[in-house]
Image (cartoon, grey):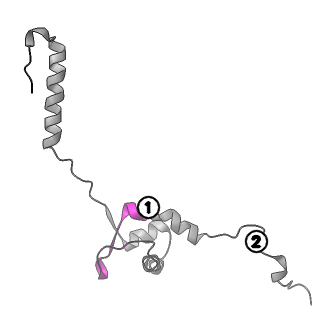
Amino acid sequence: MGNLLLSEVPSDVLAEKVAEIVLEKIKGLISIPEKKPQYITRKQVAQLLECSLPTVDAYVAESLLKKYGNGKRSRFVLEEVEAAKSTIYKIKYKTRRPGLIPTNDYPDNNKR
């Protein structure tokens, strides 16, 4: 730091500068803790996605969901499940677009 002449600096400007320097030093010393992920069970995932437990296992096998742990103690990160929810719903409720299904492929059952 350079020399500072206090007689020429207004007190409010000096106070602001000191506050800025102190705040920067404090920010450097304090580490902001990372947010810990919230884990949920397989049953909670099934309730959240409105599906069965075997379907949750199928989503894990298809790499749509990531499972943490193994065996009975498998857990899922809530934020990851929420992020995958839209992709899973697109697969779960997949609909055909109109005009893509030819009408000749389906026989008329009423004719005998």
Residue at the image point whose x is 9% and y is 18% from the top: 4
Please identify the quarter of the rendering in which residue 75 is found.
bottom left
Q: Is residue 53 above or below residue 76?
A: below
* Residue underneath mark 2: 100
7 sits left or right of 60 in the view = left
Q: Which residues are magenta?
A: 65-81
Q: Position of residue 25 (x, y in %)?
A: 13, 36
* Residue underneath mark 1: 82
43 sits left or right of 106 in the view = left
Residue at the front extreme, as displayed: 2
Say which of marks 1 and 2 sits in front.
2
The residue nearer to you, when weighing 17 against 35, is 17
* C-alpha separation, residue under disc 1 versus residue under disc 2: 31 Å
Q: Is residue 89 above or below residue 28?
A: below
The residue nearer to you, when weighing 26 against 44, is 26
Please identify the quarter of the rendering in which residue 10 is found.
top left
Label 1 SS: helix
Type of amino acid under label 2: Leu
3 sits left or right of 73 in the view = left
Residue at the bottom extreme, as displayed: 112
Type of amino acid under label 1: Glu
Residue at the image point whose x is 44% and y is 75% from the top: 63
Label 2 SS: loop
Q: Quadrant of the C terminus?
A: bottom right
Q: Is residue 91 above or below residue 6?
A: below
12 sits left or right of 5 in the view = right
**Category of crowding for the residue at label 2, using alpha-carbon neighbours closer than 10 angstroms: few (below 14), some (14–19), many (at least 20):** few
Q: Position of residue 9 (x, y in %)?
A: 14, 12
Residue at the image point whose x is 27% and y is 54% from the top: 35
Please identify the quarter of the rendering in which residue 98 is found.
bottom right
Which numbered circle lies on residue 2?
Answer: none
